Amino acid sequence: MITLQQDADGFVRMNRHFPSKTPIAILFTDGSTGEYTGARLNELYDAALATFRAENRLDAKGFSRAPAKTVHPTNNVEFVPVAAGMAP
């Protein structure tokens, strides 16, 4: 089992996909704990990644289509928003 802790801004640190059947416990800032599968957190990660790419005008693969002088330093996310009571 993997244990993650929510930070004060409502995010957990996750910079990659977890195995889909791995149980993951999240300790929320309000003191509650929730158990989720890796597949559920992978869905949240993919949604956060899509939002990041859309806000930074990147294509679906994370490439910048802007002129070369405005290259983004990284094309991925490390923090995924979570909330106590979200669907498992």
Image (tube, rainbow, N blue to C red):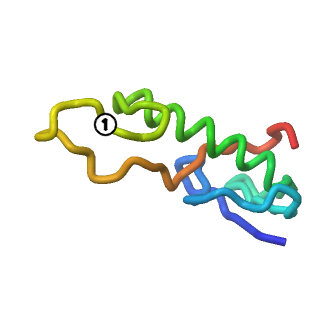
Name the residue located 63 percent from the left edge and 46 percent from the top edge. Answer: 45
- The x, y position of residue 49, in whole percent, is 53, 40
Q: As drawn, is 4 to the left or to the right of 54?
A: right
Nearest to the observer: residue 62 or residue 39: 62
The relative height of residue 65 versus residue 71 in the rendered view (above or below) is above
Q: Quadrant of residue 33?
A: bottom right
Name the amino acid, label 1. Ser
Nearest to the observer: residue 64 or residue 45: 64
- The x, y position of residue 7, in whole percent, is 57, 57
The relative height of residue 29 versus residue 75 in the rendered view (above or below) is below
Circle 1 sits on which residue? 64
Name the residue located 84 percent from the left edge and 72 percent from the top edge. Answer: 1
Name the residue located 72 percent from the left edge and 60 percent from the top edge. Answer: 18
Q: As drawn, is 17 to the left or to the right of 21?
A: left
| Quadrant in the picture for the C terminus | top right
Q: As drawn, is 69 to the left or to the right of 19?
A: left
The relative height of residue 37 versus residue 40 in the rendered view (above or below) is below
